[in-house]
Image (cartoon, helix red, strand yellow):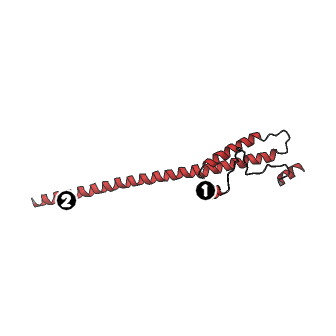
């Protein structure tokens, strides 16, 4: 009979240990979900506030390069590139800008035209000089 009481006590101890292990596993699961959620938010913020603006700046650079290449053509109209550049600048300014980016000032003036870059001329670039010679 004495051994039966000892077994019951061991069973309760074993059950208590298993319950504690299950509780710890569940607590760890909740904490991991919270960390994953924070990580997901951080990655989304990096994508939205760093990667997308980089693609906007690349698009602006590409349109400016096209303008520079086509500046010598008399039939070329800058309007399409200007509209595309203005739209990209507006999207860029909607993202979260760092203090350094904010200190550079706005890229659009009050009338909505981009002001950050000078108007390209056919002879302002060494590449254009090479093409015209």
Question: Farthest residue toward the right?
Answer: 133
Query: Percent x, y for residue 121?
Result: 83, 49
Image location of residue 12, percent across then percent down: 20, 57
Task: Report the residue at 65% width, 48% height from top.
Answer: 55
Viewer-closest of 2 and 47: 47
Q: Which residue is mark 1?
A: 98
Judge depth for marks 2 and 1 and give the one in front: 1
Mark 2 highlights which residue?
Answer: 10
- Tell me the CA gap for discs 2 and 1: 62 Å
- Looking at the image, which residue is at 19% across and 59% down? 10
Which of 91/14 is in front? Answer: 91
Residue 19 at x, y = what percent?
27, 54
Secondary structure category for the residue under label 1: loop
For label 2, the crowd category at 10 Å Cα-Cα, with few meaning under 14, some 14 to 19 and many 20 or more, is few
Question: Is residue 82 shown left or right of residue 22?
Answer: right
Image point (85%, 49%), residue name: 122
Mark 2 falls on what kind of element?
helix
């Amino acid at each position: 009979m004495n051994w039966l009481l000892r077994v019951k006590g061991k069973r309760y101890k074993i059950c208590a240990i298993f319950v504690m292990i299950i509780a710890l596993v569940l607590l760890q699961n909740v904490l991991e979900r919270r960390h994953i959620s924070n990580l997901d938010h951080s990655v989304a913020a990096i994508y939205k506030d760093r990667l997308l603006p980089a693609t906007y700046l690349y698009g602006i650079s590409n349109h400016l390069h096209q303008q520079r290449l086509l500046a010598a053509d008399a039939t070329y109209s800058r309007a399409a590139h200007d509209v595309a550049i203005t739209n990209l600048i507006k999207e860029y300014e909607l993202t979260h800008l760092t203090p350094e980016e904010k200190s550079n000032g706005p890229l659009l003036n009050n009338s909505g035209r981009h002001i950050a870059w000078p108007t390209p001329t056919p002879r302002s670039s060494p590449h254009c000089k090479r093409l015209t010679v």
